Every structure is written in structure tokens, then in C-alpha cells.
């Protein structure tokens, strides 16, 4: 029988199973992937012809940055606060989209969907790792 099959003893003396280690590594890889995609989508958000939309784009970029920082630092209060800020800007942008041309609207929608999807995926990983 392999020594790993019996578990790994951490510094505190608690045993960690190989399955736990594999699950943890898988979660970390997924978190890095989704965080990277989220950061890239926020960074690539273009400027639009409407100043009010650009204001909310800037708020989304700021809140994405703060959200990723909160995740990295395991700061639950900051994470919740930035998610609230993202949600408010997202909703405001949905109302302002009618002022955009079709091309600009499609571009904005493309990036907003990417941002929302990656936040949802990061939140689902966080929830599953909290329950793990």
C-alpha cells in the first residue's frame, strides 16, 4: 500500500487524503483560469460614444479589480461589497444600452456576458470549496 493512500499529515497533525489534495489543486487551477479570463475581459472593455456608459464601464473595471483582490485575500466583506457594486453598474448599463449603436451594443454585451459568466464560475468554485 502506498504511503499516500493512507493520507498526508500536515504540520498541525491532521491527515489530508490524496483526493482532498487533488480536489484542492483542481479548484485552484480553475480559479486562476476564471480570474484570468475575468481580468482580461474587464481590461478589454472598450470606450463607447456615451459618457454615462463609460462611467459605469470604469466602475465595473474598478470593481472587478477589487473583487479579484478580495478573493485572493479571502476578504468576504470586500467580496460582497464589490459584487454589489458590479451588480449596480451592470443593471445601470442594461438601461443605458438603448443609447448605443447596434455595433457598440453587441460589443458591450459580449464583454458583459464574459464578465458575468466568469464571476458566476468563480462564485460557484468558492461555494463548492467552502462546502468541501
Image (tube, grey):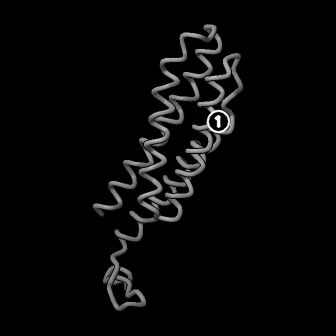
Q: Quadrant of residue 17?
A: bottom left
- Percent x, y of residue 21: 41, 71
Q: Decide: is 69 above or below 35.
A: below
Q: Quadrant of the N terminus?
A: bottom left
- Counting labels gives 1
Depth check: give the residue in front, 45 or 83.
83
Q: Is residue 98 left or right of residue 76?
A: right
Secondary element at image label 1? helix
Q: Nearer the viewer, residue 55 or 114?
A: 55
Residue at point 34% right, 69% down? 19
x, y percentage for residue 2? 37, 83
Image quarter (top left, top right, bottom left or bottom right) of the C terminus: bottom left
Left or right of residue 21: residue 99 = right
Outermost residue, top side: 102
The residue lying furthest to the left in this view is 131
- Tell me residue 66's x, y (percent): 57, 51
Image location of residue 10, percent across then percent down: 40, 86
Mark 1 burial class by Cα count in 10 Å: few <14, some 14-19, many 20+: some
**Residue shown at 57%/37% (left/top)?**
60
User: Quick check: 23 above or below 115?
Assistant: below
Q: Residue at x 50, y 29 (%)?
A: 113
Residue located beneath label 1 in the image: 58
Looking at the picture, tell me which residue is in the foreground, 111 or 76. Answer: 76
Q: State the image quarter where residue 130 is shown.
A: bottom left
Q: Is residue 112 above or below residue 125?
A: above
Determine the residue positioned at 66% across, 17% down.
50
Amino acid at each position: 500500500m502506498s504511503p499516500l493512500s493512507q493520507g498526508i499529515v500536515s504540520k498541525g497533525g491532521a491527515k489530508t487524503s490524496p483526493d482532498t489534495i487533488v480536489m484542492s489543486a483542481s479548484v485552484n487551477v480553475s480559479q486562476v483560469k476564471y480570474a484570468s479570463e475575468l481580468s482580461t475581459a474587464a481590461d478589454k472593455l472598450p470606450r463607447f460614444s456615451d459618457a454615462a456608459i463609460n462611467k459605469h464601464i470604469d466602475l465595473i473595471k474598478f470593481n472587478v479589480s477589487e473583487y479579484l483582490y478580495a478573493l485572493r485575500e479571502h476578504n468576504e466583506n470586500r467580496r460582497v461589497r464589490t459584487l454589489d457594486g458590479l451588480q449596480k453598474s451592470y443593471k445601470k448599463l442594461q438601461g443605458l444600452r438603448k443609447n448605443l449603436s447596434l455595433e457598440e451594443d453587441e460589443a458591450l454585451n459580449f464583454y458583459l456576458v464574459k464578465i458575468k459568466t466568469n464571476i458566476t464560475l468563480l462564485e460557484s468554485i468558492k461555494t463548492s470549496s467552502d462546502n468541501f
